[in-house]
Image: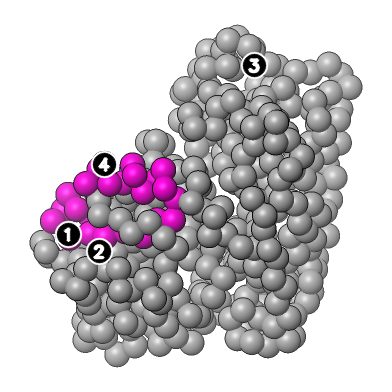
Amino acid sequence: MGYTVTERHVCRICGSGQLVCFLELPDMPLTDQFLSRDKLGSEFLWPVRLYFCESCGVAQTLHDVTVEDYYQDYHYSVGVSPLAQRFMLRLAHEAWRQFGLEPGDSVIEIGCSDGFQLACFQALGARVFGFEPSAPLAEVARRRGIPVAQCLFTREAIGDIPADLLPARVVVLTYTFDHLPDPMGFVNAMREVLDPARGVLIAEVHDLEKIVTRREFCLFAHEHTAYYTAATMQGVLRRAGFDLISLNLVPEAERRANSLLAAAMPLHAAVGPGPLPTLPLGPLGNADSYVTFGSAVQRSVAGLRQFVQRRRLSGTRLAGYGAGGRGVATLAAIARPGDFLYVCDKNSSLHGRYTPGSHVPIDGPGRVLAEPVDELLVFSYGYLPEIRDELGDFESRGGKLIPVIDLL
């Protein structure tokens, strides 16, 4: 499968040319392009460069990779995680309660994955519809009873939504909004989809303030086109005619990892809690802060490489847990062949394949008990409690679980 890269020269939000590059991660793969053994070395690799727009304040990449074919065979889903399921259930209940939804109201999800989130709304009485480009994930959603259009959402795709579901009461995107190559075009399209008086747009993205604080370079990927703070999310929404009305739809303690959960309504909506006051850009409002962060990330990457090399030289048997985006990006940045014996993941569709860029074999969690290692580097650290429960025997036998975030 070939990929085409298109370079941009202006901000994808405001069109400004006032852009400062603050970080480059060379030769990074697409995070879901897992490989069979005979395809090792054939994967897409390209630098991930991060820029700060001095005009609107949004951090972003300036390249787009053709993704239509890529997402058709996309396998990533958190639907099997109890933590993720609890979050999605709570999100549906809180949206229903806080925004006064009623049975028969329509909820549309962009990037609905395996349909679990929409099933939560459906159980409350909503009529639902999803967009999901991945054929295997769309099939799982349909088996759940969720109607799905298998395609990437575009303005033209609005025609795929059943007419009786428009205007929609809620549109939800969980970790999809930051994948959009044209965020402004998308939010503008939402004015055609949402009820202008009562419609709510709910978008969950990775919180850039937390990324910076934790040096989570593993979230910088080709698939993620822009990175938002609460203030820059508010700015993007305002540009498209929406008011940010909530950042706490689900309490932070019950969200996933570094979730920033924003809810917005069209300007001058007839109902709703009203807009939040203008949020300050704060420390991340200038290029110098980003350049400093970029230098800190480079030190963290070098430190992780040294950590792995020391382990290998000492004879420590090292494996990883989590073949999602965090794991793939981290391994691509730090690992050499043979550094990790394997990486395990619950997603059975990945078993027997290899991580792109680093070529580490992927297997199920049972391998940790069948073929113990000395240390397990946990890339999916947001799910550490359930991983620890799952692999309790590993630690009782003397193995160490090391969240990679503790080493950054």
Q: Amino acid at mark 1?
A: Ala
Element under disc 1: loop
Which residue range is magenta in the image?
Answer: 119-145
Element under disc 4: helix
230 lies above or below 87? below
What residue would you read off at disc 3?
Answer: 399
| Residue at 68% over, 16% down | 373
- Which numbered disc, 1 or 4, marks the residue that appears first in the sequence? 1
Element under disc 2: strand
Q: Residues within 10 Å of mark 1 (few under 14, many from 20)?
A: many
| Residue at 30% over, 56% down | 148
- Which numbered disc, 1 or 2, marks the residue that appears first in the sequence? 2
Tell which of 56 and 10 is nearer to you. Answer: 10
What residue would you read off at disc 4?
Answer: 143
- Residue lying farthest to the right in this orientation: 313
- Which numbered disc, 2 or 4, marks the residue that appears first in the sequence? 2
| Residue at 48% over, 29% down | 348
Q: Residues within 10 Å of mark 2 (few under 14, many from 20)?
A: many
The Cα atoms of the two marked residues, 3 and 1, are separated by: 46 Å
- Which numbered disc, 4 or 3, marks the residue that appears first in the sequence? 4
The Cα atoms of the two marked residues, 4 and 3, are separated by: 39 Å
The Cα atoms of the two marked residues, 3 and 2, are separated by: 45 Å
Please state, as top left, top right, bottom left or bottom right, where the C terminus lies in the image.
top right
- Which numbered disc, 3 or 2, marks the residue that appears first in the sequence? 2
268 lies above or below 145? below
Tell which tag, 3 or 1, sits nearer the viewer. 1
Does residue 64 appear to the left or right of 18 in the view shown? left
The Cα atoms of the two marked residues, 1 and 4, are separated by: 18 Å
Q: Amino acid at mark 3?
A: Gly
Q: Amino acid at mark 4?
A: Arg
Q: Give me the disc on residue 107.
A: 2
Percent coordinates x, y for residue 55 in the rendering: 67, 86
